[in-house]
Amino acid sequence: MSTEILMPALSPTMTEGNLSKWLIKKGDTVKAGDLIAEIETDKATMEVEAVDEGIVLDLLFKEGEANIPVNKAIAIIGDPNEKVEVKKEIPVEKIIEEKKIEKKIETKIESKKNDIIHTPSPNIEEDANLNSEEITMRQALRDTMAEEMRKDKKVFILGEEVAEYQGAYKVTQDLLQEFGKERVLDTPISEHGFTGLAVGAAFKGLRPILEFMTFNFSMQAIDQIINSAAKTLYMSGGQINCPIVFRGPNGAAAQVAAQHSQDFSSWYSQVPGLKVIAPSTPYNAKGLLRSAISDPNPVIFLENEILYGLKGPVNNDVNFSIPIGKANIEKEGKDLTIVTYSIMLQKSKEAALRLKEEYNLDAEIIDLQTLRPLDTETILNSVKKTNRLITVEESWPFGSVGSEIANIVQRDAFDYLDSPVIKVNSADVPMPYSLSLEKLYLPQVDDIINAAKKVSYIK
Amino acid sequence: MKKLQKADYIKMYSFMLKIRRFEERAAQLYGMGKIGGFCHLYIGQEAVVVGILMTIDKNDSVVTTYRDHGHMIARGLDPKRIMAELTGREDGYSAGKGGSMHMFSKENNFYGGHGIVGAQVPIGTGIAFTHKYNGEKNICRTYIGDGAMNNGQVFEAFNLAALWKLPVLYIIENNKYGMGTSVDRAAAGLDLYKRGEAFGIPGEKVDGMNVFSVIEAADKAGKYVREGNGPYIIEVQTYRYRGHSMSDPAKYRTKEELDNYKQTDPIEIVKAEILKKKIATNDEIEKINKDTLEEIKNAAEFATNSPFPKDSELYTDVYL
């Protein structure tokens, strides 16, 4: 009898891990509860304990090996009572060989998927300053904050676990080390209080970046965001502005259920006085976050936890920015328009590929980037060209950003429409926990394809 | 504490009287339909803000509740423009967009005027954070009504202020009622000044009908905060003669209770002291009374003649 020790999933969104360090070696006896390895996840480096007991027969990966998929065997232990026999009976080399083959196949699948979602949009390709080295969204956000903090001492960051823990999602990694505890502040778990404090600091002239561990917790602070941050410029007759960025992950993570998985894009987009941004790639995350930090108004910056690990090229110019209020035509097309934002851009791009292959439909994809103020001009121009529109977003359907777009398009481009606008949203229910129901809740590529077929009158 | 000069007595009396006359006139304009919405008067509480004013540095910041007219007057702001905000005119401090509850003057470090109970407390704590962050010696005076003392964010702010040793002076204006609910029906434990104890914030209670007591406490507390020791809480026991707002008949309290407080009227106390110390004669006092009445009458005149904001103003000041 031998047992495989598998790469464990140590966070809801972890799909692969790096083997930082082995704490055991071949031939060691391990007992349940012994520490066996240090694994670096998408969020932190963690120690892993043994669950089974036995002699370590083999370690299948070397220290430092990266991107090992979850559930992949990383070591093999044998029954201590059958130690010698087992070692002979188990063709360890063969197992390793099989694992290697499996790994190759998976890597292939992975890279194909990357080809789909990493196809750079036209505007990125035209960017002369494009850095060919790909970085993650997480790093793009981190770098931009660090660059802006170097430029302006008024910029500081506060939130739960942003400093010593290095960020609950590692977005603020090493900022404490560079800028010190006066400018990178861990707060207690009191969103209402520290949000009000940050708003007061912004009224007085500082430029806080406030991280919500997730936007779900911004509900604790909603009064300070809406009633204080968004309205005071108006209520003071233009005297007191509030230059603050509220940022953090928004929308569904992975199986964290109703209270930790919801999309607030339409909630915040409804409020005059706020600007709302939802980046979709490392490239636009960088350009948009810079604009958000330098904006004199309160900005809601909606990141997405699933996208934190998304890699892509960026522009490393420390002054590179993307203007707020400008959508990006991610892919040009002539048959229909897909308007989307944030994580749904990736699914829309997958859908567009299949629409071309399977139905010969050439979809134009507009990535909104900013939700408020909305770039209606880009949307209307596209609809006037394609005559068909679907909106794709993760929020609930009632009164969503797509609802407003449908309203604008029927009002300003009615004569150009060849079919009704169709919205693709999440299900109109709280987010369920179960993996199967969660998938059903979220918009999927097939939903986008079905909507595209419907506006194109394809059965 | 610095000894009060003759001019200080006159200043206190003038400011308290100005607040009283202003509020009486505001009530009149409200009755005439010239002022709309909610309108919360400060009559009876004048000694609180004027007492604090006597210890203030002009670069200190202030943030307060929606009962803010008196606070603005004490900050030295122009009664004409305060009244014009109440009447919703373009000369108002918020250009007619804020109204009675939402008035600001950034150049005078007056950060409102907040309409949401308790919201100004974390905000004031954040303004104090900025003073510290910028290495300034100034403090932020954050006023809190007794009603807000049961609001969660107040304790979150206390915790943060104590944790980060922020230069914030919390002043609880305990006027005995949060709208129509008396403090003893809302707060478990009546010593509101002790509510910072768990965070290590010192607090003390002071008679808010007597301006001299307020000055003494504010001076001591202000020094403590300015020296970098962190926050401090003063609970000022005061009383509002009028209802919570203009539409409140105040049936939740007795006439005897009100009359009782009027026996210790804060303005009368200062006046008696001035006469006793022979700082001014009766005639001189009368002159101040007359001038003040005239000034407030002019303010009302100005506020009712100032134009309404232009229609185009509806869409300005949403974004900078």
Image: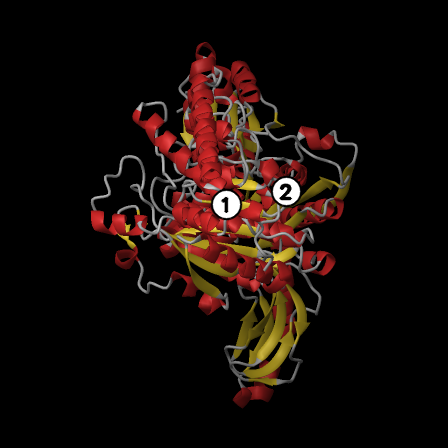
Picture mark count:
2
- Tell which of A171 and B216 is nearer to you: B216
- Disc 1 element: helix
Q: Quadrant of the C terminus of chain B?
A: top right
Which residue is identified by label 2? Answer: A205
Dot 2, how many residues are within 10 Å of its Cα: few (below 14), some (14-19), or many (20+)?
A: many
Dot 1, how many residues are within 10 Å of its Cα: few (below 14), some (14-19), or many (20+)?
A: many
- Tell which of B156 and A25 is nearer to you: B156
**Residue contact between numbered discs 2 and 1, judged by CB atoms under 8 Å:** no
User: What colour-coding does the image apply?
Assistant: secondary structure
Which residue is identified by label 1? Answer: B12
- Viewer can see residue B113: no
Location of residue A17 (image quadrant): bottom right
Q: Position of residue A432 (x, y in %)?
A: 36, 51
Q: Nearer the viewer, mark 2 or mark 1?
A: 1
Left or right position of A297 against A180: left
